[in-house]
Image (spheres, coloured by chain):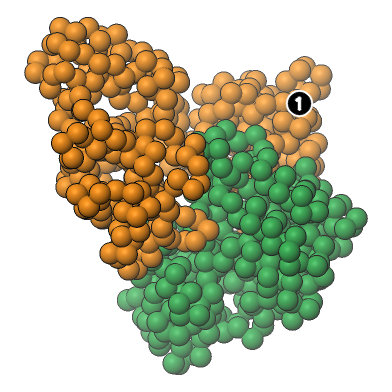
Chain colours: A orange, B green
């Protein structure tokens, strides 16, 4: 789950992290009393909004409304701006960066900080980046904050504030099941106060059940991806025209890769998972057909379920759908010869290997098979 | 020999009374696994296909001498089940369960390590040592006893590759599905180290995918420490950045975790990388 800046800041504030004052608006006329002078910030889930012109200053109420009207409805990397956040403009003495993420290799949370805030953390040279693992069972110990202070070369006054923000961010990270908590920049103002000028928060989808209050927040999904998500189907829309459906994430990726090697391009990533529930299979094909592929490529490795049983399921789902989209299918497993017969009997193109199936799908699309 | 799992294992199935638990208990026994007990809180005293069910893991250890556990317990209770198994003294734990919250895994994995417990998974198809035992959900028919060790982040893709290996005459010493999550109990490097030490294993197959840097770390380890021939496959060459491709761990973030980087790392370590999954068998023949 990704969070818009204003929502992330609301959660930050709940944990005591200082954030600027701001108001949210979805129409210019809703803007009544913004904290002037302000920054008008597009609320989108994708990065790069600053460069796209989605963050602009305003001095007066009229100007704020004018700028807001220009930003609202803007397209930023394919996402339409539906809301703007008008936030008090901060005087800046220094920009820092503070982040918490999961280090997969170390299997521990990782605290990152740098005195070179305001740029993407990936651009910061390694020797300027402070990194310290935090054992999840123990939490942040005082030495971590001592080395943070030394690493960033901060005065005591500033580092005390940064230290408590690090603690608060860590508490949020653990309690909210976050994958990423990022404050960039963490601004030091001329009067010495430290405040989170931006807020990035990603919460683990697997922990959604522990945070029902976030269940209905907009995510960066296409309408069809959202429909699939609501039905519990793993589906991603891609920019090709061959609709791929397979079982298992790895096999689905491998199928898309094979298509590419044969000069084709997958239009969907649809992982059927371990299901042999006919209703679920039907729902998955419904989503697939709504994506309007030129050809459908089915690739199933029948593990527990026999190949011919899978073939019957596919047959049933497609017959109920009355689709005219050509289907190339490859079903591997026990009784695969029988499965192939079933597929061919209903006019599908049957293949034996992934490579062959991919090649066939590309040919069918080109009208050569 | 083989790694981690032999026919000596006395397995307790956590969540044995559920649909998946029951079905896979039957399949594991058919494979030759000694399933000595099941655990489902509240179902103690019953039996599943003659296997006694207990309320607590400790009872399975005391009464049935269980020494390894496989867990099918739903995600919300998986941490509870894992810690219970560790505290009962079991040293090998396979967690099949998918969608376990990352922060639960952050609690489970370092704790298991501190107690000397090996965890395989979560979100994994488990472990199989052909001719001996299986703790997992992989289909039995694809395996054949042999000398190739298999390490994989995937489920069905592993079946595909193991099946092709078996058909080409390359049997397996042990097959480990390390799982598709970002945090797993046993990673690729740790599995490689075990196969390098194992006398029965003569060659190794690594099946990776996008996300994280475990393949890069594995390639580095192979270059420095592995003397046995290794071949690899990497899924997700065409995956777009920023999207989670089905597995929680399969995501390209901030330019990191691309298939390109992994393929390059393997190539630099002298590991041939297959273009199509079944090509692994051909590469093994040439390795």
Q: Residue furthest left?
A: A33
Above or below A108: residue B279: above
Q: Which residue is located at x 37 percent, y 33 percent? A: A118
What's the chain of the residue with tag 1?
A: A
**Image quarter in which the N terminus of chain A is found:** top left
Quadrant of residue A184 within the rendered picture? top left
Q: Position of residue A96 (x, y in %)?
A: 33, 40
In the image, B217 versus A77, the foreground residue is: B217
Residue, disc 1 = A263
Above or below B68: residue A97: above
In the image, A76 versus A293, the foreground residue is: A76
Quadrant of residue B197 within the rendered picture? bottom right
Q: Which residue is located at x 9 percent, y 15 percent? A: A32
Label 1 environment density (alpha carbons within 10 Å; few <14, some 14–19, many ≥20): few
Q: Position of residue A342 (x, y in %)?
A: 72, 39
From the viewer's perspective, is A194 left or right of B193?
Answer: left
Q: Which residue is located at x 42 percent, y 73 percent? A: B111
Residue B243 appears anywhere in the view? no
Label 1 secondary element: loop
Q: Position of residue B113 (x, y in %)?
A: 48, 74
């Amino acid at each position: 789950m990704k969070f818009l800046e204003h929502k992330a800041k609301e959660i930050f504030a709940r944990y005591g992290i200082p954030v600027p004052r701001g108001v949210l608006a979805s129409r210019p006329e809703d803007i009544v009393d913004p904290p002037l002078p302000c920054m008008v910030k597009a609320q989108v889930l994708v990065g790069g909004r600053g460069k796209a012109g989605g963050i602009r200053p305003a001095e007066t109420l009229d100007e704020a409304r004018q700028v807001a009207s220009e930003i609202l409805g803007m397209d930023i990397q394919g996402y339409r701006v539906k809301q703007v956040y008008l936030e008090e403009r901060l005087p800046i003495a220094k920009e820092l960066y503070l982040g918490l993420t999961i280090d997969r290799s170390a299997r521990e949370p990782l605290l990152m900080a740098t005195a070179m805030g305001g740029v993407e953390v990936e651009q910061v040279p390694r020797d300027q980046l402070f990194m310290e693992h935090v054992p999840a069972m123990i939490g942040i110990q005082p030495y971590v904050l001592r080395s943070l202070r030394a690493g960033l070369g901060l005065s005591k006054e500033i580092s005390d504030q940064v230290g408590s923000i690090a603690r608060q961010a860590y508490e949020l990270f653990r309690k909210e099941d976050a994958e990423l908590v990022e404050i960039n920049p963490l601004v030091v103002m001329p009067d010495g106060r430290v405040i989170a000028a931006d807020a990035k928060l990603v919460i683990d989808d697997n922990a959604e059940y522990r945070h029902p209050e976030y269940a209905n927040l907009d995510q960066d999904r296409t309408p069809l991806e959202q429909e699939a998500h609501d039905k519990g189907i793993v589906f991603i829309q891609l920019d090709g025209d061959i609709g791929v459906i397979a079982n298992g994430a790895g096999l689905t990726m491998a199928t898309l890769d094979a298509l590419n090697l044969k000069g084709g391009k997958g239009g969907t990533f649809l992982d059927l998972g371990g299901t042999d529930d006919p209703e679920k299979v039907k729902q998955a094909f419904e989503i697939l057909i709504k994506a309007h592929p030129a050809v459908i490529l089915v690739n199933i490795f029948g593990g527990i379920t026999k190949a011919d049983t899978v073939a019957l399921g596919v047959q049933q789902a497609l017959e109920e759908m009355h689709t005219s989209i050509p289907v190339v299918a490859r079903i591997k497993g026990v009784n695969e010869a029988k499965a192939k017969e079933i597929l061919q009997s209903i006019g599908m193109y049957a293949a034996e290997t992934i490579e062959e199936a991919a090649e066939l799908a590309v040919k069918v699309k080109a009208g050569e098979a | 020999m083989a790694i981690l799992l032999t026919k000596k294992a006395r397995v307790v199935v956590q969540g044995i009374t559920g649909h998946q638990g029951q079905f896979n208990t039957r399949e594991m026994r058919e494979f030759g696994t000694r399933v000595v007990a099941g655990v489902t809180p509240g179902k103690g005293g019953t039996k599943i296909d003659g296997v006694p069910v207990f309320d607590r893991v400790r009872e399975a250890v005391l009464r049935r001498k269980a020494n390894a556990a496989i867990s099918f317990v739903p995600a919300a209770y998986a941490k509870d089940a894992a810690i219970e198994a560790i505290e009962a003294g079991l040293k090998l734990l396979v967690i099949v369960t998918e969608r376990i919250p990352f922060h639960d895994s952050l609690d489970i994995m370092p704790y298991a390590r501190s107690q000397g417990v090996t965890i395989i998974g979560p979100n994994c198809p488990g472990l199989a040592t052909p001719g001996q035992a299986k703790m997992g959900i992989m289909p039995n028919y694809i395996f054949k006893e042999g000398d190739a060790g298999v390490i994989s982040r995937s489920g069905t893709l592993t079946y595909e590759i193991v099946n092709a290996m078996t058909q080409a005459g390359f049997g397996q010493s042990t097959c480990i599905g390390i799982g598709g999550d970002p945090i797993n109990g046993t990673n690729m490097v740790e599995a490689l180290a075990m196969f390098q030490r194992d006398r029965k294993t003569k060659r190794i197959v690594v099946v990776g995918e996008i996300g994280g840097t475990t393949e890069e770390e594995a390639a580095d380890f192979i270059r420095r420490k592995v003397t046995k021939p290794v071949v690899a496959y990497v899924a997700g060459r065409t995956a777009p950045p920023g999207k989670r491709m089905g597995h929680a761990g399969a995501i390209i973030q901030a330019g990191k975790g691309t298939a390109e980087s992994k393929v390059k790392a393997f190539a630099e370590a002298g590991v041939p990388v297959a273009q199509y999954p079944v090509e692994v068998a051909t590469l093994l023949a040439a390795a």
